Amino acid sequence: MSATAESLAAAAALDKYGEEDLFSLLIRYGLYVGALFQFICISAAVLMAGDESTESGETDREGEPVRSRLHKIRKLEKKKRR
């Protein structure tokens, strides 16, 4: 029994942090809450990104490109002429 008591005493002596105070608990749980908040925000951004194409007022027709695509093509052509 004294061997385990000695090993516990030695372990307690090596523990340089001791008991956690209120500030360290607040920091630790605050980090967990922050990580959870980031996870929720990123997952919401990923899940809501798929709805973006349905809100567009412009429709794709065969043989008729969308206005934004035409704008991009014109912009690239203008860049080539420089």
Image: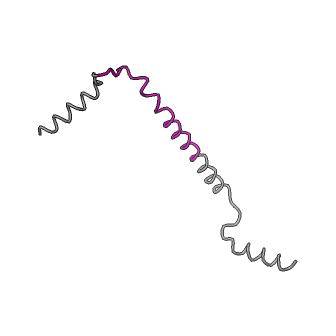
Q: Is residue 69 magenta?
A: no
Q: Residue at x 27, y 21 (%)?
A: 64
Lateral position of residue 12 relative to residue 42, left or right: right
Magenta stretch: dominant secondary structure: helix
Q: Which residues are magenta?
A: 34-62
Lateral position of residue 75 relative to residue 23, left or right: left
Q: Which image quarter is the N terminus in?
A: bottom right
Which of 63 and 70 lies nearest the eye of the viewer?
63
Seen in the picture, residue 33 relative to 50 is either above or below; the reply is below
Q: Which image quarter is the C terminus in?
A: top left
Q: Residue at x 47, y 31 (%)?
A: 50
At which x and y percent is residue 61? Answer: 32, 20
Q: Residue at x 49, y 36 (%)?
A: 45
Which of 65 and 6 lies nearest the eye of the viewer?
65
At which x and y percent is residue 60? Answer: 34, 22
Which of 11 and 23 lies nearest the eye of the viewer?
11
Lateral position of residue 66 relative to residue 22, left or right: left
